[in-house]
Amino acid sequence: MSPQPVLEAQDISKHFVLKGSGDLLGRNRPVLHAVDDVSLSIARGEAVGLVGESGCGKSTLARIISRLVDPTAGTLSMSGRSITDISSARFVRSDLRRKIQMVFQDPSDSVNPRFSVFDIIADPLRQLCRPATKAELVARVREAARAVNLAPELLDRFPHQLSGGQKARVGIARAMIVDPELLVLDEPTSALDVSVQATVLKLLARLTREANVALLFVSHDLNVVRLLCSRIFVMYLGRIVESGPTEEIFNRPRHPYTKALLSAVPTLRSGRTGERVKLEGEPRSPIDPDPLACRLVGRCPWQQQRCTAAEPELAACGPAHAVRCHFPLD
Amino acid sequence: MKHLEISGQAEPVASAPPLLSINELSVRFRTRSGIVNALDRVTFEVRPGEIVGVVGESGSGKSVTAFAVMGILDAAASITGGSIHFEGRDVLGMNRRERDMWRGSEASIIFQNPRVALNPIRKVGQQIADVLARHSPASPSAIRQSVLDALRQVRLPDPEKRQSAYPTELSGGQCQRVGIAMALACSPRLLIADEPTTGLDVTTQAVIMELIRDLARSRQLGTVFITHDLALAAQYCDRVVVMHAGHVVETAAVSELFSAARHPYTAKLLRSVPSLVDRLEELQAIEGSLPDLRRVDLPFCRFAERCERRISLCDSAPLSLAPIGPNHCVACRNPL
Amino acid sequence: MNSMMRERLRVAHYLIAENPINLVAFGLFAFLLLAAIIGPVVAPHSPLATDTSIALQPPSVAHWFGTDQLGRDVFSRVLVATRLDLFIAFSAVILSCIVGSTIGAVIGYFGGWLDATVSRCVDVLMAFPLFVLAMAVVAALGNTVMNVVYATAVINLPFYIRLARAEINVRRSLGYVEAARVGGSGDFRILSVILLPNALSPIVVQASVNLGWAVLNAAGLSFLGLGVRAPTPEWGIMVAEGAHFIASGQWWIVFFPACALMITVFSFNLLGDVVRDILDPRLRT
């Protein structure tokens, strides 16, 4: 019997009602569909990638999963326990808060400039785990710093005295110190230099493997996601358009958008085949999307009549491989 | 040996005299905390019709080189040595007026972060018209026509409508197209693109890069493409110049560089980039960090302190680029 | 806080050494503080002692600043008044700063209808000529020193509210605030422990610049007869009283308190500049 997934999301939606528009009585206001009916599950220790371009909703979804933002609809549960039955404000005080932690994109504004490195790493520990003695706190902070290869003398320094790579590692130490079960990473390496990225990526892989922590790796950089994740979800305009094992997605993408995305990524690795698939024009507006058409209509080179008549459902197209398309590629 | 997928490219004219020739260029910056030796004897050239990629990490000096060529360095910068020649003319010797006329009409630059590079309170059509009016004054209707032509050239859909848009009304990719249109409006012969696709989605990046490459080929422009993304350089450039800490460490044709890099830094860089490896285990970080360019005791080879192949010869005398193969130069005393 | 303090002191030292004006600012400020603290003790004469036989005497060896119409020693009065004027200015600014920053931080953080409501109230407040408002407050509450403090504090509130609101607003969606939420901090802790230290610098700069204005305000109110009452020595009152005598040639009764006011305001303004230079992170390498 397989164990409970560490995180399960069911029909998560996030809609924003746009203020200041619509008729005089405030009815019929346009609604921005940032995330629409997303369901996914992450198994214990699994590294899952969430990819898509700007505006696809992946960052919003990441924040919903880490309970920084309340979804408009849908439920989340951790190891079977619902975590959406209380508001995100109350969740902060719950004992489940420490189980989902987050690593943020820009190291320079994800660490408090007025806190010392020690305090930055110790803060979640103080708030969520309340160690019994000061000695225990110090020991655990030192251990967390050591695990990310931060020299102990850096603990007394302040963020402006640290390099980008060092700050990124502080962010990881801070997230890992409370022994989370799921780590949500929102583009953790895109603001880093190329040579530092490699260090941080390998560090993440090692740490999470050793602690059996599940990863939700949100990124627009497919090359990075490919190296770290075993399963990938591809998002477009708030919906999951394809999901499956990494190898499958990269070698046999079934959704036109996935194929276009992959063909646009510059890479020199072996095994890349095929011509570049181009998508015409710009993505459609996420405001009041047509419920009766596929969201790629107008851009898809394989578009047919049916695509403007009904929105496709997410359907299996292989073992553990699902695609949302009326005419999946092969 | 990896199988490399380099898209087919038309070969530029190899025997033509260089369009741009940078020789032993050295640049220093005065800062509050000392003098930064940003560039040290940078040397490379660009031929007409050729796309040269300048790759390096941040701090390697690639943007400083571009700004030095265009004459838009910060006031705190001073060129302490070397020369820049454009079609045989001494660029650094030009007076202010000549330089202003040269910039925009004979050589042009596209900046990163397109939205920031455009004036947010001026319509994009007007901004292109400004460039045209400055270098080739003509009647307003002729300029209007040229603006529309320029926008069509960069494949901006619906140019009549778009030209009266403000930059904030356009997407990142559209803004960059406008930036390219402005750069090419007066038909320059040299184009410098400073990380033109930073901040753009990957699909938009592919489209913009293709646009730049197509325009460069059709107009036989000499292009300098600055980037930190090695795979991108591999895909769109003919030749690559690798920079490290203000030095040029290696220059070679693209296929040669990626299959047979000779400088230890280049080799390490190629192994540290996710787009160039197959598995996480193959990924190797580069140890150590960039040397502080404010030091007065900088070694002759600025990579020496991190290099496993360091020998006593490395510390003996200043380093220069030396040919190591056909069209392949490296600045190393102990190359691979 | 050790290494941060050390670095701040290093920058402070650098700034003072670099620009002699900064030294002047600190020197003047230190002198004023000294005058406020030990003034009443070292004053050569009692500031309240009247002696009409020596009234309206020009500056002399016995009375450095001369005597006023009641024979009181102007120098002693100017010196002793320092304490009162500084007290009013500091109290008003500190009160204004604390209350204003708190309100501003809360509305900047929570936004929404709270922000909209309070901001409109602030707009209304700022629509009044502020000095007239201060007069109205003192007239309504009564003529006491504390009411002058409250009045000055009230008219300075909008600046702190707006400043704190802006500083908090800009920072509330930054990575480290989200990290604090994920790390178990509730709204109150995020505002007070996480965000406020970051917003402090511009507020402190505003406060030090504000001091000069507060002194002028207090003096202005007393000049009009509101707030501090005779015979309490206070620069504004002294200027008011002395104004009558300029025409008849007894300039020293107005001149010295006015000078004191000017030097104080000047010193606070300079100080504000220096504090801004020290705290402004953009100045650091």
Image: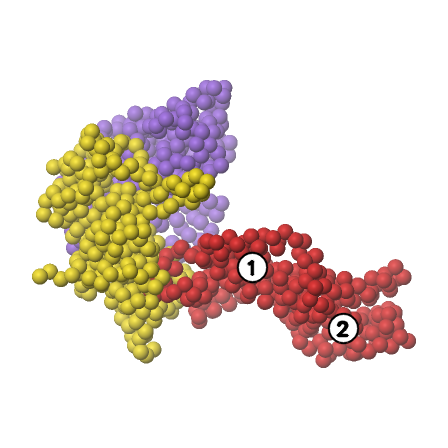
Chain colours: A yellow, B purple, C red
Task: Tell me the quarter of the picture where residue B250 sits.
Answer: top left
| Residue found farthest to the front | A25
Q: Position of residue A36 (x, y in %)?
A: 27, 46
Three-letter code, disc 1 = Tyr
Left or right placement of residue B249 versus residue B169 in this view:
left
Viewer-proximal residue, C34 or B102?
C34
Where B55 falls versus B7 (above or below)? below
Residue A115 seen from this side: yes
| Left or right: A231, with B27 as reference point | left
Say which residue appears at 46% left-offset and 37% top-offset. B119
Residue ID for mark 2: C232
Quadrant where the image shows the N terminus of chain A: bottom left
Cα separation, mark 2 vs mark 1, equals 31 Å
Query: Are circles 2 and 1 on residues that touch, CB within 8 Å?
Result: no
Q: Is residue B114 left or right of residue B217?
A: right
**Residue displayed at 33% across by 67% down:** A93
Q: Amino acid at mark 2?
A: Thr
Q: Which residue is mark 1?
A: C160
